[in-house]
Structure formats: C-alpha cells, structure tokens
Amino acid sequence: MASQDSQVRIQQVLHKFQLLPPERLATVASMAAEASFNRVWDNIEGANCDNL
C-alpha cells in the first residue's frame, strides 16, 4: 500500500499530465514506453534473440 506522501505525489504528477497539451502528452508517453521497452530489450536473453 502506498504511503500518504506517495499518494500526494501521484496526484501531483497526474495533475501535471492533465495540464499538458496533447502533443506534449504524446511525447511523454512515447518516452515512457521507450524506457520500458529498453529495460526488456537490453538484456542477455534479448541479445541472444538478436543473433537469430
């Protein structure tokens, strides 16, 4: 369970997202997706697949 401080920070971030214009929100979403994919793809198992 998230602490009260964490909940407040989450709400602050969500509020900032709501204030972004659509094109900036799309940029942020792309950057977040890229970071997530990099964690999955940048590993030993992924490197083995590159050699197929």
Image (tube, grey):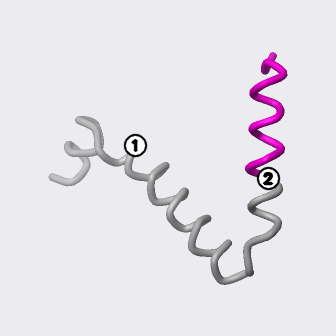
Q: In terms of depth relative to the viewer, which is nearer, 37 or 29?
A: 29
Q: Identify whether 49 is placed above or below 15.
A: above
Q: Residue at x 74, y 80 (%)?
A: 21
Identify which amino acid the numbered label 2 is placed on: Leu
Extent of the magenta region: 1-13
Q: In the drawing, does residue 36 fall left or right of residue 24?
A: left
- Residue drawn at point x = 82 percent, y = 34 percent: 8
Q: Is 47 situated above or below 34?
A: above
Is label 1 in contact with label 2 (beta carbons under 8 Å)?
no
Residue 16, position in %: x, y? 75, 60
Question: Which residue is at a point 38% across and 51% down the rendered structure image?
Answer: 38
Q: Is residue 43 magenta?
A: no
Rendered residue at 53%/58% (across/down): 33
Q: Which residue is mark 2?
A: 14
Q: Quadrant of the N terminus?
A: top right
Magenta span: chief secondary structure? helix
Callout 1, which amino acid?
Arg
**N-term-proximal mark, 1 vs 2:** 2
Q: Residues within 10 Å of mark 1 (few under 14, many from 20)?
A: few
Q: Which mark is residue 31?
A: none
Task: Name the image quarter holding residue 7.
Answer: top right
Q: Position of residue 39 (x, y in %)?
A: 40, 43
Kindly identify which numbered label has been placed on residue 39.
1
Per the image, label 2 sits on a secondary structure element best described as helix
* x and y, in percent, of residue 13 in the image: 74, 50
Query: Where's the C terminus, which quadrant?
Result: bottom left
